[in-house]
Image (cartoon, rainbow, N blue to C red):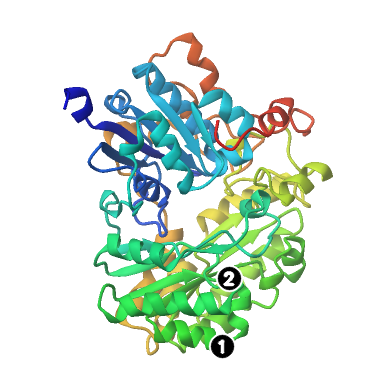
Amino acid sequence: MGTALKRKHKVLIINAYFDPWRSSTPTRWFIPRAMAPIYLAGAFNRGRTDVKVWDEVFDGALLDPRIFNWPDLVVFTGLTAAFDRAHQLSAYFRHANPSVVTVIGGAIPRALPALCAEIFDYVSQGDVEDLPAIIAEVFDLSCVSETGAPRFDLARPTMGVGYLETTKYCNFACSFCSLTGEGRQYQPHSEQSITRQFDAMKRVMGVMVLDNNFYGNSRESFQRRVEMIGERWRQGQFRGWGALVTGDFFKRPENVELMAKNGCKAVFSGVESLDPKVLKSFNKKQSVTSDPQVLAKLCAEHGMFFDYGMIADFSQQTTAEVNDQLNAVLNEPSIPLPGLLSLTIPILGTPYFEASARAGRLMPNLLLSDMDGQKVVEWPMEPLEKVVPFVAELLRFRGRKVALMRHAVKHAWYWRKHFTWDQTALAFARPLHRFGGKVNLGSVRQMRQSFQESRPTYCAMSDGLRSAYKPQVKLPAKFEKCFEPLRITDETGALTDELLNARSRTPAVA
């Protein structure tokens, strides 16, 4: 066999990301992690390829120029708002190695198919199952894995947590969710797929189920998946597990009992808002009756920690209303603080985005990268000079740090008799980690770039460009366009021609 055949093809899989706080350093303790690169890596044959992954959330911004000329193939994935970042990174790789092959898949090409087809060599609007066909075309069929088992060995462990996916998509249609915009049908994994993931995971401390909706629309499927996880728990593969469920899950208390009996220790449910009017406007009918206090009590009585998210929508809510809702949580020790606190995001391609554009709510000169949930991008119902300072304080918990610490202690103490020591520690530490601030530690390059960033203004109309839009190494003029931001609206607030052209449909794999 010749030397050329023996050489392993070098593959780099990247989760592109712009940190909302303009930090380039790693975010190591956020759960759940982005696991798409790990599942994508499973499509490659280990014997014929050398695969590495880089997650710009967990690993921080990719700034090391020595990496750019290493791969033969680069696979990009990420949230829609990370398109500009993937575009920038593609320029670095093409400059360092003109023969490199670039592939992009996931939410970005589903929202921007035509533009992605112009930039990347291969564009997949499908799932990880579409990658083997691309691998076979770029290299050959021998480079495709026979099993497709995720490469958990490439994921550096975080607090001993392993990850599992048992279903895809969601059976609800929340107006702000990218899954609604994509219109894909909810479907469970086969038992073989779940078993394969467990075998690849090996022994871990806990398992986080990555499903968008673990409960789903088939009780039979739900019960079987719970039982499969429970079997592994009883075998001692992990000490407990958690999953994301929708509000309808709690309408049958026996669901909570079933999961608890099979080792579940935590659930996350997207409550999103305590205002029924806002929930109905989101078409989030499954959460209208979701009272965090009631759900926290129900879960705790079954030995399960309850977590949830909250979204502030200032196009429908006043600062006083949002302030009162948060203070109500801070003053009630039985309710956990939300694990996720965000502003409404008009995600490209969703019904919410289309409605916001038609109604003229989108601010002028918006960038796609502005859609991160941590700045005002829609006209609020109150004056900007009142809303923006409030948002800056809200998202950083400024002026509430003492109340934050007090609530963390009281909440952990309140449920201590129902929780294990691990859960009690989680109940105490989670809000402090989420809202207590971030320590920017990373490589010298990452810390330097973080230091050079301008401070966020919490309003898209006043935020300046990130430093990433200036090339970190000298590049030829032909790459200048790769560092131009994708503009969503023009100076009048109307959608740009650039965006309308970028959204044109193209074949699923180009």
> Quadrant of the image for the C terminus?
top right
Q: Nearer the viewer, mark 1 or mark 2?
A: 2
- Residue under the point 72% across and 60% down: 282
Residue 48 visible in image: yes
Q: Quadrant of residue 488?
A: top right
Which type of secondary structure does the marked residue at label 1 adopt? helix
Using the image, determine if residue 448 lies above or below residue 308. above
> Quadrant of the image for the N terminus?
top left
Residue 65 placed where, x, y %? Answer: 31, 24
Residue farthest right in this picture: 359
Residue farthest top in this picture: 477
In the displayed structure image, the side of residue 333 where residue 173 appears, left or right: right
Using the image, determine if residue 83 lies above or below residue 326. above
Toward the viewer: 497 or 330? 497
Sort mark 2 into few (<14), some (14-19) or many (20+) by Cα contacts within 10 Å. many
Q: Quadrant of residue 490?
A: top right
Answer with mark 1 or mark 2, whichever residue precedes in sequence: 2
Toward the viewer: 293 or 359? 359
Q: Quadrant of residue 193?
A: bottom left
Distance from label 1 to label 2 (Cα)?
Answer: 16 Å
Label 2 is placed on what type of residue? Gly
- Residue under the point 60% across and 86% down: 252
Residue 430 placed where, x, y %? Answer: 41, 66
Residue 410 placed where, x, y %? Answer: 44, 80
Sort mark 1 into few (<14), some (14-19) or many (20+) by Cα contacts within 10 Å. few
Toward the viewer: 366 or 94? 94
Toward the viewer: 383 or 424? 424
Residue placed under numbered mark 2 in the picture: 216
- Residue under the point 34% across and 18% down: 96
- Residue 253, numbered circle: 1
